[in-house]
Image (spheres, coloured by chain):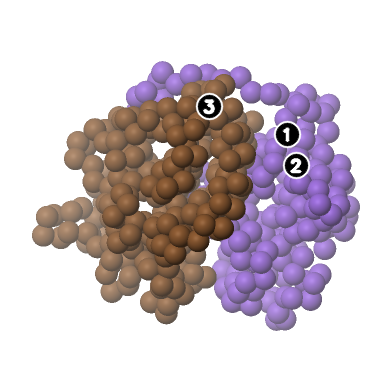
């Protein structure tokens, strides 16, 4: 295999048709909420089957996906409009950092106040967490909304609140009310 | 001078590039802090080696709680490990660092272009890190780091790992690499985890599975992804390295 990938084998993968619906089953928790919001910002309405003890799985025709990052990756390309995955390495690094902070720290109620205050500082000068909107904004917003719902979010985070509104406005109007009611 | 410059400094006397902020080969010095017994750290080193990115490494005493020290929090505000610095850019956590280095690197991307294959790869990475990872870490801790050799903990971890490695064996029966026909981040994620497991008495879990064992052999002989004269897996730690928490730098000699 050379520098430009010559010699790489081409592989066939399962392909969903345009008429196939997106469906998400999983636990009724922040993990599913992050996936719902990741779908919403890409203009995808998910058919939901949430409940205790269910394993996270998103299906789209013959395609089955079982982890959060894989769901974000898939929805980013299969959703409406240009993918949100950044081309710049720095933005990509920041995107994945904030996803990890949401999944590994906020989801476990660790360092909530410190993280949200830092986010507020960043969002005072940035419209979105990594600068431009990325795959991270939808899921992290869902994580913050879940904390608000649980009463675990500190007060006085005006820039975070403004960012939550911006992210909500990214969701197409036709699915916005439904998506936001599922995550907040 | 921050922990990066204390622990993973470049060698100014040897004229290492990027130390004064000038760029060469579009790359500043990459500085990584992690631990030899941390599979996430090893994944970052493997990606750098595969992509031809030089990397100075240093260790943090995670077992002793140094990742919660004021010095470490000064560079990684939420205490996330591993930690990477490239000039004025900082990044933390395995996905962030591996994908950043992959994007900056010289070889073809380790992430498939086809979105379904890319998602499948992400699934494989999640199984390696989130399902197998904690149990391999428990065995490494019990046998090499803390070395308390608690049989109940080791047996419980092995019981969980068995079915996961059966699934991996099935995948490698159908495909040359973990996520398909081509080498990808999924191979790096599994290799880092299984290399640590292979250093422990629980190596029988690998020995019992011919395809997994053969695939590890393939990766241990494979030239780096970017075509340089480096075998990435040669940088993985030995038992002594794990016990002394020592990790190797990524040094590229044939630009």
Instruction: Give me the C-alpha separation between circle 2 and circle 3.
Output: 23 Å
Do the residues indicated by labels 2 and 1 lie within the same chain of the protein? yes
**Residue that numbered label 1 is attached to:** A64
**Residue that numbered label 2 is attached to:** A57
Quarter assignment of residue A14:
top right
Instruction: Give me the C-alpha separation between circle 3 and circle 1.
Output: 19 Å
Chain in purple, by letter, is A
- Find out whether the residues at labels 2 and 3 contact each other: C-beta distance under 8 Å: no
Q: Is residue B121 visible?
A: no
Q: Residues within 10 Å of mark 1 (few under 14, many from 20)?
A: some
Q: Nearer the viewer, mark 3 or mark 1?
A: 3
| Quarter in which the N terminus of chain A is drawn | top left
Q: Residue A152 in the image: state x and y as whole percent.
A: 74, 76
Residue B141 drawn above or below residue B118: below
Q: Which mark is residue B172?
A: 3
Residue A78 drawn above or below residue B9: above
Earlier sequence position, callout 2 versus callout 1:
2
Q: Nearer the viewer, mark 2 or mark 3?
A: 3
The residue shown at (58%, 41%) is: B162
Indicate the secondary structure of the residue bearing disc 3: helix
- Find out whether the residues at labels 2 and 1 contact each other: C-beta distance under 8 Å: yes
Residue situated in front as seen by the camera: B31 or A165: B31
Indicate the secondary structure of the residue bearing disc 2: strand
Do the residues indicated by labels 2 and 3 lie within the same chain of the protein? no
Quarter assignment of residue A60:
top right
């Amino acid at each position: 295999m050379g520098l430009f990938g010559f010699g790489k084998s081409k592989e066939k993968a399962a392909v969903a048709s345009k008429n196939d619906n997106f469906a998400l089953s999983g636990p009724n928790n922040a993990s599913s909420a992050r996936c719902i919001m990741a779908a919403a910002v890409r203009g995808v309405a998910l058919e939901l089957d949430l409940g205790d003890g269910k394993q996270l799985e998103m299906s789209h025709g013959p395609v089955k996906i079982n982890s959060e990052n894989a769901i974000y990756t898939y929805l980013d390309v299969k959703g409406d409009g240009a993918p949100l995955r950044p081309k710049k390495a720095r933005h990509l690094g920041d995107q994945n950092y904030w996803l990890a902070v949401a999944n590994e720290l906020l989801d476990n109620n660790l360092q909530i106040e410190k993280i949200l205050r830092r986010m507020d500082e960043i969002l005072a000068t940035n419209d979105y967490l990594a600068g431009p909107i990325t795959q991270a904004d939808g899921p992290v917003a869902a994580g913050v909304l879940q904390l608000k719902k649980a009463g675990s979010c500190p007060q006085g985070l005006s820039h975070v609140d403004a960012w939550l509104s911006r992210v909500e406005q990214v969701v197409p109007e036709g699915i916005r009310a439904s998506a936001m009611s599922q995550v907040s | 001078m921050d922990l990066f410059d204390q622990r993973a400094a470049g060698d100014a006397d040897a004229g290492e590039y990027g130390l004064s902020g000038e760029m060469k080969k579009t790359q500043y010095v990459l500085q990584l802090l992690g631990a030899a017994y941390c599979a996430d750290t090893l994944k970052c080193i493997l990606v750098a080696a595969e992509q031809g990115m030089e990397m100075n490494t240093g260790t943090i005493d995670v077992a002793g709680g140094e990742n919660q020290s004021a010095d470490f929090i000064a560079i990684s505000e939420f205490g996330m490990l591993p930690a990477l610095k490239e000039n004025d850019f900082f990044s933390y956590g395995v996905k962030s660092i591996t994908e950043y280095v992959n994007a900056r690197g010289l070889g073809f991307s380790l992430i498939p272009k086809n979105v379904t294959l890319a998602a499948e790869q992400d699934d494989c990475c999640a199984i390696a890190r989130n399902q197998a990872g904690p149990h391999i870490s428990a065995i490494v801790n019990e046998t090499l780091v803390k070395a308390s050799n608690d049989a109940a903990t080791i047996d419980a971890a092995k019981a969980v790992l068995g079915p996961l490695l059966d699934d991996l064996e099935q995948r490698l029966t159908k495909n040359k690499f973990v996520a398909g026909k081509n080498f990808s981040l999924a191979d790096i994620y599994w290799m880092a985890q299984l290399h640590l497991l292979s250093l422990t008495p629980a190596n029988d879990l690998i020995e019992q599975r011919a395809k997994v064992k053969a695939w590890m052999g393939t990766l241990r002989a494979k030239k780096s992804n970017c075509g340089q004269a480096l075998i990435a897996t040669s940088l993985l730690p030995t038992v002594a390295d794990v016990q002394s928490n020592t990790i190797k730098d990524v040094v590229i000699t044939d630009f």
